[in-house]
Amino acid sequence: MALKQSRRSALKYGLLALGALVMLVPFVDLTLGALRSPTERLARPPVYFPAVPQWQNFVTVFEAYPLARWILNSVVVTVLITAAQLATSAMAGYALAKYEFRGRALMLRFVVGAQLFPFFLLVIPLFFILRYWPLAGGNDFLGQGGRGLLGTYWALVLPFTISWYGIFLMRQFAVSIPDEMLDAARMDGAGEFRIFRSIALPLLRPALTVLGVFVFVYHWNEVVWTLTVTRSSPELQTAPIGIHLIRGVFDNEQEQSLQQAAILLTILPVAVLFLSLQRLYARSLGGGLTGQ
Amino acid sequence: MTRERRLAPYLFLAPSIVLGTVFFVVPLLVSLALSFAVWDSLKAPRFVGIANYRYLLTRDPLFYESLWNTARFVGATIIIGVPLALALAVAFRRSRWKPLWRSAFWLPMVTNIVAVAYVWQFLLADPYGLVNRTLSAIGIAGPAWLADPAWAMSAIILVFIWFHLGQDMMLISAGLDAVDEEVEEAASLDGANRWEVLWHITLPLIRPTMLLVLMTNLVKGIGYFALMLVLTDGGPANSTNVAALHVYRLAFENLRLGMASAAAYLLLAVVMAVLLVQFRVMRRGGLDAWR
C-alpha cells in the first residue's frame, strides 16, 4: 500500500515538475539571451550560458529604443481601458441585476450572445469607423480629409470601453446583493445613484478586483488591434508592438540581446501582478477571461 | 415606484448602450454591408451583390486552404492540449506547493504574444535553438521548424499549447474544486481504487466543465490568429495562414475590404454552426445554459 502510494505520488509530482519545467525553460532561455554578449552569440555553436552576464543590457535598452515611451503608452492605454470597463460593467451589470424594466430580458440575452462574436469580425469596420470619425483629426463632418481618431489614444481605448463579458460577470455578482439593503436605503431617502455608489459598489469590490486584473493583463498584452492601429503612429506604440516592429529592422547579435531584455521588462509587471494575486483566481472565479 | 427609480436603470445602462452601439452593433452592420461591395478604402465602395461570397466559395483556393489550416490548428490544440490540461489539473488537485505550480503554469498565459513569438523564435531556431540542440543530444535531427512548410503549423500548435495550457488547467481545476469529495470517498470505501474513482466518479462529475472547456477552445480557436500574425505571418507558403488571419490580411495587406468582410461573415457562420451543435451536445450533457 505504502509502495503504491509513493509510486502514485511520484507519477503526480513527476508530471507536474516536467510540465513546470517546460513552462519555465523558455523564460530562462530568454533571460540568458538578454545577458549574452555579441561574441558569445556569434560563436558556432553559440555559447549558451553567458560567461560574463551583460546586465547593462537592461539599461542600454532604454537608450537604444524608446522603451520608456512604449511602457508609458502601455500604462496609459491599459489604465484608461480598465477604468472605463470597470465603470461601464459595474453600472450596467447592477442595472440588469437589480431593476425591473422593459427590455431587461432582451438586453440580458444580447449581452450573453454578443460575447460569442469573435474579434476578427470587428477589426475591419472599427478601423474605418475611427478613420472616418467626423470632425476629428482633420476630418470634416462627413469624415473626409484627415485621419480621424487614428493616431490618438482614443483609437486604442474607445473600442474597449465596454465588455459584454464584464457586464455579464458584474450582473452575476450583483444578483446576490440583498434587495432589503437597497430598499432600506431608499426608505432613508437615498437617491438611486447614491445607493449604487455607497451600497452596491462596496459589495461588488471583490468582483471588480478580479475583473480589473483580468482586463489589465489582457490589454497590457493586446497585440492585434494595437498593431493594426499604431503601425503608422510610432508615438502611440505599446511595448510589445514597438519591439515587434523594431525586431524586423534591427536584427543583429547586439540588438537581439537588447530586444530580449526589453521583452523581459514588458513581461515582468503583469507577471508579478497576476501571480501575486493568484489566490483570488484559484477559486472558481471565471477563468478563460485572459483568452487572447 | 418613483420616477427616479424607473429612470435609474436606463441611466446606468446608457453608457454601455451608446458605446455598445457605436463600437459593436454599427461595426457589425458596416462589415455586413461591406461584404456585398468592393472597396479599397480610397474610392467609394461599389455594390456587387453576392459576388464576394461566390468568389470565396467557388474560386478562391486560399480560402478553403485557410479553413483547412484552421481545422488542423483547432483540432490539434484541442486533442493534445485538453487531455494534457486535464491530466495536469488532476495531478495539481491534491498536490503540495500549489502556489509554485500555479506560478509556473500561469506564467505563459500572462505573457504577451509578441514576447511568446520572440522567445520561441530563438528556441525553435535551426540548428542552434534549444529545442534542436536538445533533440540532437538524443540523436534526432530536428526540422527547421518555422522555415519548413511541413513543420510550421506543428510549431505553431506546440507554441500555442504551451501558451494556453494554464487557462484550460485553471478552468478544469475550478471544476474539480467543485466536486463533492464525499462522493469520491464513499466510492473508495466501497473498494474502488484511485483510478476507478477518477474514471467512474470524478470525470463524469466534471463533464459540464469539460464541455465548457471544449466549447471555449473551439469558438476561440476558430477566430484565433494573433500568434500566426506575429510569429509567421501565415507563412511559409501559407502553411500557417488560418482563416481569421486570411481575413485580416485580405483587409490590411491587400486592401480588399469587401472580400475580407465576406470572408469574416462566412467564418462567423462556421462559428455559429459549431455553437449550435455544441448547445445541443451540452443540453444532452446536462449543462442547459451558457452559464
Image: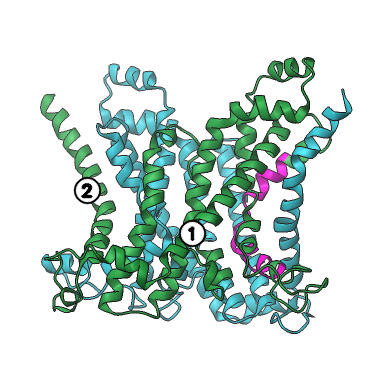
Chain colours: A green, B cyan
**Front-lying residue, A147 or A8:** A147
Residue A266's spot in the image, x, y percent? 39, 58
Which of the chains bears the disc numbered 1? A
Residue B136's spot in the image, x, y percent? 14, 69
- Give the label on residue A277, or none: none
Chain part drawn in magenta: A108-129
Residue A193's spot in the image, x, y percent? 74, 31
- Label 2 amino acid? Leu
Which of the chains bears the disc numbered 2? A
Judged left or right of residue A88, residue B185 is left
**Front-lying residue, B249 or A8:** B249
Q: Is residue A119 magenta?
A: yes
SS at mark 2 in the image = helix
**Mark 1–mark 2 CB contact (< 8 Å):** no
Q: Which of the 4 image quarters holds residue B228?
A: bottom left
- What residue is shown with label 2? A18
Q: Residue at x 75, y 84 (%)?
A: B43
- What residue is shown with label 1? A72
- Label 1 amino acid? Leu
Quote the CA–CA distance across marks 1 and 2: 37 Å
Q: Residue at x 18, y 73 (%)?
A: B141
Of the two numbered discs 1 and 2 in the rendering, the one whose residue sits closer to the viewer: 1
Magenta stretch, main secondary structure class = helix
Rendered position, B180 above or below B256 = above
Q: Which of the 4 image quarters holds residue A202?
A: top right
**Would you call the spot at circle 1 few (<14 residues within 10 Å), some (14-19), or many (20 or more)?**
some
Q: Can residue B124 be seen in this snapshot?
A: no
